[in-house]
Amino acid sequence: MSDTLPLSPRPTLGFIGAGRVARALASAATQANYDVSVVASRNADSAQRIGAALPNCETLTVDRPEDMNAVFSRADLVFLTVPDDAIGSCAAYLAPHAGQALVHCSGASEVGLLAPATQHGGQIGGFHPLFLFAGLDDDATRLSGSAITIEADTPLNEILQRLASDIGCRALSIPPGERMQYHAGANYAASFLLCLLDEATHLWQAIGMSENDAREAMWPLVIGTLNAARERGLSGALAGPVSRGDAGIVTRHTEALASMGGNHATLYSLLTLRAIHLARQRTNADSTALDAIARAVAPYIPPCSPSPESNT
Ligand SMILES: NC(=O)c1ccc[n+]([C@@H]2O[C@H](COP(=O)([O-])OP(=O)(O)OC[C@H]3O[C@@H](n4cnc5c(N)ncnc54)[C@H](OP(=O)(O)O)[C@@H]3O)[C@@H](O)[C@H]2O)c1
């Protein structure tokens, strides 16, 4: 149906859901000379906060979901930037026509959630920025250089790829139906990094270090590690006892963490398996020492976890 009236190569943009992603994408697209003509949200203040910063952008307050479709009389490519749980229920009220498209920005939700919106010939797609939008004023600027994962048929796919490139990002694609593994991976590269830093802070505070000293000591370590990984790859940047084949230190780490109770030793041991996996990729890997380390952490890994050797 959509091939009867193709999308304009540079469509006017609209947003439903005036949160962190809408704010940054609307601003980045405007800076790339796209026309963001409408921002709609339930809360008038949140829509106005975004719309007021953009030229010629109308803001709509949509109290009832059935009023949301009004955005398609003002924009041809609409981003549904609401929480994931609301995507399906909103899509049921949206009816883009041929030459228009509805796109969500979720990494976890399938594009098929938007299927109810295709009944009048509009296209649907996914546009997931691999970026942590924290609601900061410079999110739009910092977004530049990120990857954006696009899932859509032509011609929408080409339009979304062009938009990604125009806002300084790199387009990626994933096979349909693989979003769970894709999104779980993204979680490791973003939120779970924070969880690891939280564990480090916790261990240091447990021996009397102030939270402030812990955080300040952490940044050079974190940034240095990430820079090294970027230059030399993950296995090339690996440091610490696993990289040296030092089973004695790993044993003493796990004993100290086990004495704290909780799941500190288990977390450490599971991550040690990943470190062993990285260390084995090195040309000079000492298999005997790495096997000894795997045996040292095995007692701390719950029985339902994979064996130390199935660490890929
Ligand atoms: N934040 C990130 O780092 C990030 C990164 C990549 C992708 N994403 C994806 O981008 C999408 C938006 O995320 P976000 O972080 O921008 O969310 P957000 O900051 O929480 O904003 C969502 C907005 O949607 C509106 N909303 C909430 N519930 C609604 C409902 N039931 N019906 C209609 N509107 C509703 C709210 O507007 P009102 O205030 O007007 O109610 C809210 O401002 C999600 O799919 C998310 O998975 C987020």
Image (cartoon, helix red, strand yellow):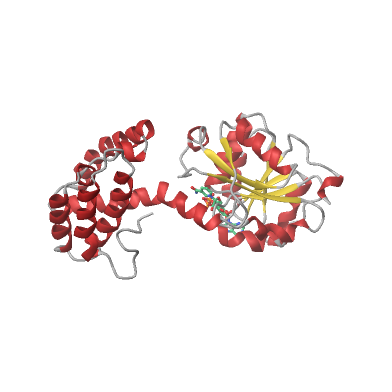
Image point (72%, 43%), residue name? 156
Count of residue discs: 0
Q: Up-down: is 297 above or below 142?
A: below
Q: Position of residue 92 (x, y in %)?
A: 71, 62
- As drawn, is 84 to the left or to the right of 59? left
Q: Position of residue 21 (x, y in %)?
A: 55, 45
Q: Up-down: is 164 above or below 289?
A: above
Image point (31%, 58%), residue name? 309
Q: Up-down: is 198 above or below 225?
A: below
Image point (21%, 39%), residue name? 217
The answer to which of 67 and 177 lies nearer the viewer is 177
Q: Up-down: is 75 above or below 253?
A: above
Q: Position of residue 216 (x, y in %)?
A: 24, 39
Snapshot quadrant of residue 241: top left
Q: Is residue 75 visible?
A: no
Q: What residue occupies the far bottom of the structure in this picture?
A: 303
Q: Position of residue 56 (x, y in %)?
A: 69, 35
Q: Is residue 103 visible?
A: yes
Q: What residue occupies the far right of the structure in this picture?
A: 4
Image point (56%, 56%), residue name? 178
- As drawn, is 78 to the left or to the right of 73? left
The answer to which of 183 and 59 lies nearer the viewer is 183
In the rendered image, the quadrant that contains the C terminus is: bottom left
- As drawn, is 8 to the left or to the right of 271? right
- As drawn, is 220 to the left or to the right of 77? left
